[in-house]
RNA sequence: CGGAGUGUAGCGCAGCCUGGUAGCGCAUCUGCUUUGGGAGCAGAGGGCCGGGGGUUCGAAUCCCUCCACUCCGACCA
């Protein structure tokens, strides 16, 4: 992408409303624009990152065996009256009335709707297990939205719901998601630690929050130092191997990690780390809470009616954009992990009026693009200093700077954003170096 | 919802106390010069001073009243 043909409204100064790094940088890098408290438009650079994250989440869900669906944002109040949550949910739920005076709502979550879908089509134990997910915008009318997309009112969430015949099967479904989550976050360059968590108003008795440690985290967390060495990548574990997965789950979940509400100082290990964390995912087993009230049942092999065992699993996709920045930035701007970076390379033409320089840049841009690299090419006539500063701000993993000085020697400058290391690389070797990295 | 603030050009702010021609920096546009870490000079455009009501000869400024946004707290992916 040529910058001259892109929409990247960066800001030189910190917007006054932003307090934390991710919020500041998302605004300054032209990723988002606030339209109301906790509600944002996503600009080209922002949506690109959001979609990369979304695709990693989707890919890992698919690999775990879950099936993607899409449920609407607007729901009828009737379903929520059935489960009893229409009255229980409170003011976080945005209630709307349509032209026929029917009570509607903008969905804060989808347990009722998915239960309705499953109960109307799943009648036999042979149809189980089921695990369905969608990635959809939600709305929760938070008392106080803050920190940009980290606590928006409107947010993009991946949520899925498992349906099983027995508790043992449900536990297996739960463990699959536990693994899928670890893999998902690892792929984004994050270490997320699963912590024993409160089940809150959703109910149930088995729940983990996946928490990224960051100074600006919203809650206090307590983790065994052993987590710092633990294998949270789940390498080599097979979803289909129940015993292997169970052992992995057992091993990891026995290492102490707890949020504020669940922390028990008496049973905590000696090597305890107290830190702050950002919740990026949450998994629940809640049994028959919704299937019971909404009549989601199947016949088992004996012809007996059995109420479905359910779990639900959420990942805050839009929140992750902020969480990744919190975990990866410096005083100059964002430092994107390669996998979620909006572009992998920022190519800078340091002297556009110099014909040879511009030609070399155009040529290299074409070579990069042909090689399948995602490039943002700053071909504008702004000053060199401004170009460097902007590239640092938007945080692409690699910067390639071309100016007449180095070009005379047939060289370009390659900079790694994460470390700041700079190398002169010959213009003939640069493409290969970047594709082979 | 309680407490504390802020709304003045696209962004960041001054002016308000003590009423009297609406300002500064950055950004934008034009021209020239520049071009390896947010360039220089010269010129230009851009405002219902958040909205409504009042006081006054006269209101960005004083009074009343809405609204929006931010921060702290209780609540949450």
Image (cartoon, rainbow, N blue to C red):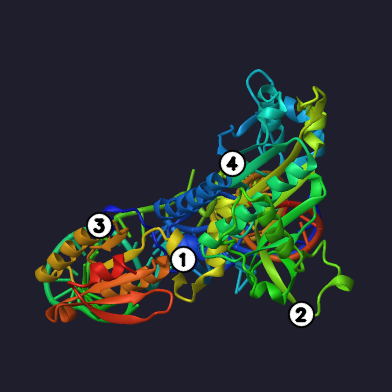
The residue that mark 2 highlights is A271
From the viewer's perspective, is A115 left or right of B11? right
Which residue does the image show at 14% across and 82% down from the upper left? A409
The image's mark for residue A337 is: 1
Question: Are labels 2 and 4 assigned to the same chain?
Answer: yes
The residues tagged by marks 3 and 1 sit, at their Cα atoms, a distance apart of 20 Å
From the viewer's perspective, is A378 left or right of A264? left
Q: Are marks 3 and 4 in contact (CB under 8 Å)?
A: no
Question: Are labels 2 and 1 assigned to the same chain?
Answer: yes
The residue that mark 3 highlights is A369
Which residue does the image show at 18% across and 73% down from the upper left? A427
Which residue does the image show at 61% across and 59% down from the upper left? A182
Question: Are labels 3 and 2 assigned to the same chain?
Answer: yes
Is residue A148 in view from this perspective? no
**Residue sticking out furthest to the top:** A100
Residue A82 location (% of width, % of height): 79, 27
Q: Earlier in the sequence, mark 3 or mark 2?
A: 2
Query: Dot 1, crowdedness within 10 Å: few (<14), some or many (≥20)?
Result: many
**Residue sticking out furthest to the right:** A266
Element class at badge 4: loop
The residues tagged by marks 2 and 1 sit, at their Cα atoms, a distance apart of 30 Å
Q: Are marks 2 and 4 in contact (CB under 8 Å)?
A: no
Residue A378 location (% of width, % of height): 27, 64
Residue A101 location (% of width, % of height): 69, 20
Q: Earlier in the sequence, mark 3 or mark 1?
A: 1
Q: Earlier in the sequence, mark 2 or mark 4?
A: 4
Q: Earlier in the sequence, mark 2 or mark 1?
A: 2
> Comparing marks 3 and 2, which lies closer to the viewer?
2
Element class at badge 1: loop
Chain letter for the residue marked with disc 3 in the picture = A
């Amino acid at each position: 992408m040529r910058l001259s043909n892109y929409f990247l409204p960066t800001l030189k100064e910190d917007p006054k409303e932003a307090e934390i790094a991710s919020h500041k940088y998302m605004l300054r890098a032209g990723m988002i624009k606030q339209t109301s408290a906790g509600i944002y438009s996503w600009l080209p650079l922002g949506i690109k990152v959001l979609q990369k994250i979304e695709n990693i989440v989707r890919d890992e869900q698919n690999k775990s065996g879950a099936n993607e669906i899409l449920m609407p944002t607007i729901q009828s109040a009737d379903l929520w009256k059935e489960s009893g949550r229409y009255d229980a949910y409170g003011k976080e739920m945005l209630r709307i009335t349509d032209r026929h005076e029917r009570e509607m709502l903008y969905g804060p979550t989808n347990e009722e709707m998915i239960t309705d879908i499953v109960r109307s089509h799943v009648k036999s134990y042979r149809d189980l297990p089921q695990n369905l997910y969608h990635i959809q915008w939600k709305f929760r009318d938070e008392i106080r939205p803050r920190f940009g997309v980290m606590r928006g009112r409107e947010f993009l969430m991946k949520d899925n719901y498992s349906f099983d015949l027995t508790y043992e099967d449900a536990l297996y479904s739960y463990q699959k998601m536990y693994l899928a989550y670890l893999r998902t976050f690892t792929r984004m360059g994050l270490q997320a630690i699963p912590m024993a968590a409160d089940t809150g108003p959703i109910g149930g008795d088995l729940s983990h929050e996946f928490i990224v440690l960051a100074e600006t985290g919203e809650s206090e967390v307590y983790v065994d130092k052993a987590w710092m060495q633990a294998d949270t990548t789940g390498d080599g574990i097979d979803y289909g191997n129940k015993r292997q997965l169970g052992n992995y789950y057992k091993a990891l979940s026995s290492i102490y990690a707890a949020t504020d509400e669940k922390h028990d100082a008496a049973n905590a290990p000696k090597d305890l780390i107290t830190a702050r964390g950002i919740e990026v995912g949450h998994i629940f087993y809640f049994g028959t809470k919704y299937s019971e009230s909404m009549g989601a049942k199947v016949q088992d092999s004996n012809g007996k009616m059995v109420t479905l065992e359910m779990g639900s699993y959420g990942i805050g996709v839009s929140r992750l954009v902020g969480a990744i920045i919190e975990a990866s930035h410096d005083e100059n701007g964002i430092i994107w992990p390669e996998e979620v970076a909006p572009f992998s390379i920022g190519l800078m033409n340091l002297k556009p009026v110099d014909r040879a320089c511009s030609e070399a840049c155009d040529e290299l841009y074409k070579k990069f693009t042909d090689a399948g690299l995602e490039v943002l090419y700053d071909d504008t006539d702004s000053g060199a200093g401004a170009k460097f500063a902007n590239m640092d701000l938007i945080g692409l993993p690699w910067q390639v700077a071309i100016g007449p000085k180095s070009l005379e020697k047939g060289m370009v400058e390659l900079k790694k954003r994460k470390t700041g290391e700079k190398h002169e690389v010959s213009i003939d070797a640069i493409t290969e170096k970047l594709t082979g990295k």
